[in-house]
């Protein structure tokens, strides 16, 4: 289960509410010559998926393509009704899209979870925003915890964060860096700048 160990997760990122440094403009990322596939659950808004494609294209300077909608398979469910194991979803995606040889992002409105270690205690079936394989091709992001406000902004933030893991980035401690870990705390991500710190940008490039 080497891949499981590589999986890194994101929660609601806990930030102070001070606005980001406005001098630091959007991350300049060297163009990566590849396509990222975007697939979504059949109940997910195609319009929102299209918006996320634009966000990804703009931020990572890549092309994106949409794949046919999917239903999350039963084998990825947990014992809790309506909650899915994100690690199992990633395993399933790895199998399903093995011939793509490209990154695949799954967007869903289902509850997704993982076993999360918080302060030395394992919280099983802990609800998360997203999960991405670090240095890999697969990530899953849900809107289920975003409420009704600024869903698009929150979603874009988590999508770019998870893809950051796919591109090899770990969690980062620099304030206002998009790779900051959440530590299981509440979200204020809609007010955060969509940018990586210098250190993360260097790794990406
Ligand atoms: Zn993360
Ligand atoms: Zn960083």
Image (cartoon, helix red, strand yellow):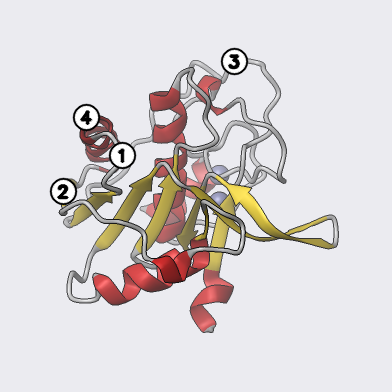
What distance separates the C-alpha of mark 3 from that of mark 1? 31 Å
Name the residue tied to disc 4.
47
Q: Are marks 1 and 2 in contact (CB under 8 Å)?
A: no
Horizontal and vertical percent position of residue 3: 49, 77
Task: Give the farthest residue toward the bottom.
Answer: 1
Which picture quadrant has residue 179?
A: top right
User: In the structure shown, which secondary structural element does the residue marked by tag 3 occupy?
Assistant: loop
Whether residue 201 is visible to the viewer of this picture, yes or no, is no
Say which of 38 and 6 sits in front: 38
Name the residue tied to disc 3.
19
Q: Residues within 10 Å of mark 4 (few under 14, many from 20)?
A: few
Which picture quadrant has residue 25?
A: top left
Which picture quadrant has residue 67?
A: bottom left
Q: Residue at x 56, y 54 (%)?
A: 81
Q: Nearer the viewer, mark 4 or mark 3?
A: 4
Disc number at residue 76?
none
The mark nearer the N terminus, 3 or 1, is 3
Q: Nearer the viewer, mark 1 or mark 2?
A: 1
User: In the structure shown, which secondary structural element does the residue marked by tag 4 occupy?
Assistant: helix
Say which of 6 and 154 sits in front: 154
Instruction: Say above or below: 103 vs 147.
Output: below
What distance separates the C-alpha of mark 3 from that of mark 2? 34 Å
Instruction: Say above or below: 40 vs 58.
Output: below
User: In the structure shown, which secondary structural element does the residue marked by tag 1 occupy?
Assistant: loop
Q: Nearer the viewer, mark 3 or mark 2?
A: 2
Whether residue 24 is visible to the viewer of this picture, yes or no, is yes
Name the residue tied to disc 2.
66
Q: Are marks 3 and 1 in contact (CB under 8 Å)?
A: no
């Amino acid at each position: 289960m080497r891949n499981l160990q590589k999986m890194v997760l994101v929660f609601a990122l806990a930030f102070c509410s001070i606005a980001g440094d406005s001098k630091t403009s959007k991350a300049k990322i060297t163009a990566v010559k590849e396509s990222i596939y975007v697939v979504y659950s059949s109940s997910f808004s195609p319009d929102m998926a299209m918006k996320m494609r634009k966000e990804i294209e703009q931020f990572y300077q890549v092309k994106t393509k949409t794949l046919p909608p999917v239903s999350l398979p039963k084998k990825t469910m947990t014992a809790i009704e309506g909650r899915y194991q994100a690690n199992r979803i990633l395993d399933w995606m790895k199998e399903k899209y093995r011939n793509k040889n490209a990154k695949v992002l799954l967007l869903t409105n289902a509850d997704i979870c993982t076993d999360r270690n918080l302060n030395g205690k394992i919280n099983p079936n802990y609800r998360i925003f997203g999960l991405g394989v670090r240095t890999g091709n697969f990530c899953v992001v849900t809107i289920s915890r975003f409420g009704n406000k600024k869903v698009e902004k929150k979603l874009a933030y988590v999508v770019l964060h998870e893809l950051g893991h796919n591109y090899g980035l770990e969690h980062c401690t620099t304030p206002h860096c998009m790779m900051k870990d959440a530590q299981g705390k509440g979200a204020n991500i809609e007010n955060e700048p969509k940018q990586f710190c210098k250190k993360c940008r260097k790794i990406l490039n």
